[in-house]
């Protein structure tokens, strides 16, 4: 069983600047086939932006995704973990704060992300959540 965050995290970070438009962020998510990006000001992680944030915090309110910035819609000051933190610490943070993803930061720099799915795969590879996490997203129009 994986012991450290570095053993289960998804390495590499897809990031946008706080002043990037929601359209830019959404296009990046689509191109990378992901549902979230780190919002970084230089090398500092200042937030996490999910596809749900864009939908619920902006589009549902009638905001113009071309003019609204990632920094105004993201979840600011996200909880973070380090690569050498125990997996149990990531699980505890997610449980206590009801979050599904944590940026992984080393020496102040984002180096990856650990998700609920990553942890499910590491803890119980036969679980339904692990199976869903490994599946390719359905990218059909209207899906």
Image (cartoon, rainbow, N blue to C red):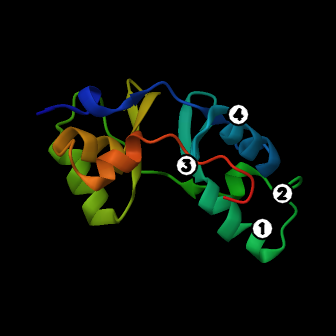
Left or right, residue 110 beside residue 37: left
Query: Which quadrant is the C terminus positioned in?
Result: bottom right
Per the model, the C-alpha gap separating discs 4 and 3 is 18 Å
Cβ–Cβ under 8 Å for marks 4 and 1: no
Query: Can you tell which of label 4 and label 1 is closer to the viewer?
Result: 4
Cβ–Cβ under 8 Å for marks 2 and 3: no
Indicate which disc residue 59 carries.
1
Query: Can you tell which of label 3 and label 1 is closer to the viewer?
Result: 1
Query: Can you tell which of label 2 and label 4 is closer to the viewer?
Result: 4
Crowding at mark 1 (Cα within 10 Å: few <14, some 14-19, many 20+): some
Q: Which residue is mark 3?
A: 48
Indicate which disc residue 115 carries.
none
Cβ–Cβ under 8 Å for marks 1 and 2: yes
Circle 1 SS class: helix
Circle 2 SS class: loop
Per the model, the C-alpha gap separating discs 4 and 1 is 20 Å
Q: Is residue 137 above or below residue 109?
A: below
Per the model, the C-alpha gap separating discs 1 and 2 is 7 Å
Of callouts 4 and 1, the N-terminal one = 4
Q: Which residue is mark 2?
A: 65
Asked whether the viewer can see residue 77, the reply is yes
Of callouts 2 and 4, the N-terminal one = 4
Query: Can you tell which of label 4 and label 3 is closer to the viewer?
Result: 4
Cβ–Cβ under 8 Å for marks 3 and 1: no
Front residue (pair 41, 3): 3
Front residue (pair 11, 124): 124
Residue 97: x percent and y percent?
A: 33, 64
Of callouts 1 and 2, the N-terminal one = 1
Q: Which residue is mark 4?
A: 31
Left or right, residue 20 beside residue 7: right
Per the model, the C-alpha gap separating discs 2 and 3 is 17 Å
Left or right, residue 68 beside residue 35: right
């Amino acid at each position: 069983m994986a012991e450290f965050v570095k053993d289960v995290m998804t390495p590499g970070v897809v990031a946008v600047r706080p002043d990037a438009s929601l359209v830019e962020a959404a296009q990046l998510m689509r191109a990378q086939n992901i549902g979230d990006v780190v919002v970084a000001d230089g090398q500092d992680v200042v937030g996490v932006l999910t596809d749900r944030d864009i939908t619920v915090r902006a589009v549902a309110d009638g905001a113009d995704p071309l003019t609204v910035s990632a920094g105004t819609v993201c979840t600011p000051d996200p909880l973070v973990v380090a690569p050498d933190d125990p997996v149990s610490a990531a699980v505890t943070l997610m449980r206590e704060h009801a979050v599904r993803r944590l940026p992984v930061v080393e020496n102040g720099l984002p180096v990856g992300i650990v998700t609920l799915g990553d942890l499910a795969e590491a803890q119980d590879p036969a679980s339904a959540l692990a199976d869903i996490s490994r599946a390719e997203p359905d990218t059909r129009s209207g899906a």
